[in-house]
Image (cartoon, rainbow, N blue to C red):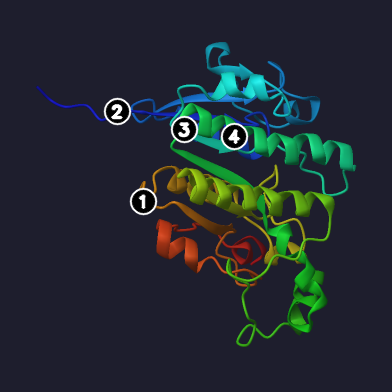
Amino acid sequence: MQQTTSKKQVLITGAYGLIGNLVYARLAAQPDRYDVFALVKSVAPSARTAAMRITEIPDECLRLADVSDFDAVARAVAGMHTIIHLAAEPDSRAGWESVLANNIIGAHNVFEAARLAGVQRVIFASTNQVMFGYRAEDAYQALLSGRLDEVDLDTLPRLDHLQPTRPLSDYGCSKVFGEALAHMYAYTHGLSCLCLRIGWVVADDRVPSARGQALWCSQRDIVQLVERCLNAPASLRFDVFFGQSDNQYNFVDIEHARQVLGYAPQDRAEDQLA
């Protein structure tokens, strides 16, 4: 008798957001590999999300919960192998109350519920904004202001995952807190926790501006990176990766993701602008 490979039970939080919905569509298209579920606040997508092309999620795959509600999150994560935690207040200009509820309390609820439920891995959506404070340094001022003609690529030091974070907003700080939670749950509780510092992913999948060449990630590249985290060896307990495309002017290092995960970005900002 032919053996069948067991499928992974995967829960995506924020599955009606841009990246969450892209990841949902990718995984749901592989029913032989994944059983995919979605944690959302409402059965219907928000007005902002509905304006985008989205993949609708069947009712039987939906788990309704606000991430600030621990009991609801605990019910949603039961039986899952992996949680891809993308739900958050995404606006760097958002008020503290929303950041606190969605990004601080919400992140802690997801990690704690995962621990209690015996989840094997949490993939945490962080942001490259945790490094935006480096724009105060001469090496990055022109780059992150879009003055690319002033940038010497031969001497530009790419920021890597080992350098200290320098957030500039409550949103950025909340993502540093989420990364710290990931480290704590990995080394205190043995949960595999992988953090993705995601770049500038946009609905029309185009480089938004000259400054975007240092920050941009295409939709298919971020989906690939998430799936590579999903299928990384179980022995990979904790790590941090930058999620950007293979842009000439990247201000961060993506080689670590190539080496550890086999990340092979397919897109470059310069190809769009040629």
Percent of width and height locating residue 230: 44, 42
Camera-near label (4 vs 1) is 4
Percent of width and height locating residue 163: 63, 71
Compared with residue 111, is residue 132 higher up or lower down, i.e. above or below? below
Mark 2 lies on residue:
6
Mark 3 lies on residue:
119
Q: Amino acid at mark 2?
A: Ser
Camera-near label (3 vs 4) is 4
Question: How far apart, in angstroms, are the residues tagged by discs 3 and 1?
Answer: 14 Å
For marks 2 and 3 on the same chain, the one whose residue lies earlier in the sequence: 2
Q: Which mark is residue 33?
A: none
Q: Secondary structure at mark 2?
A: loop
Question: How far apart, in angstroms, are the residues tagged by discs 2 and 4?
Answer: 25 Å
Camera-near label (2 vs 4) is 4
Label 3–label 1 contact, CB within 8 A: no
Compared with residue 51, is residue 215 higher up or lower down, i.e. above or below? below
Q: Amino acid at mark 3?
A: Val
Compared with residue 125, is residue 139 higher up or lower down, i.e. above or below? below
Q: Residues within 10 Å of mark 3 (few under 14, many from 20)?
A: many
**Quick one: 107 or 245, which is closer to the camera?**
107
Q: Which mark is residue 235?
A: 1
Question: How far apart, in angstroms, are the residues tagged by discs 4 and 1?
Answer: 20 Å
Q: Is residue 60 visible?
A: yes
Question: How far apart, in angstroms, are the residues tagged by discs 3 and 4?
Answer: 10 Å
Q: Amino acid at mark 1?
A: Ser
Percent of width and height locating residue 107: 67, 39
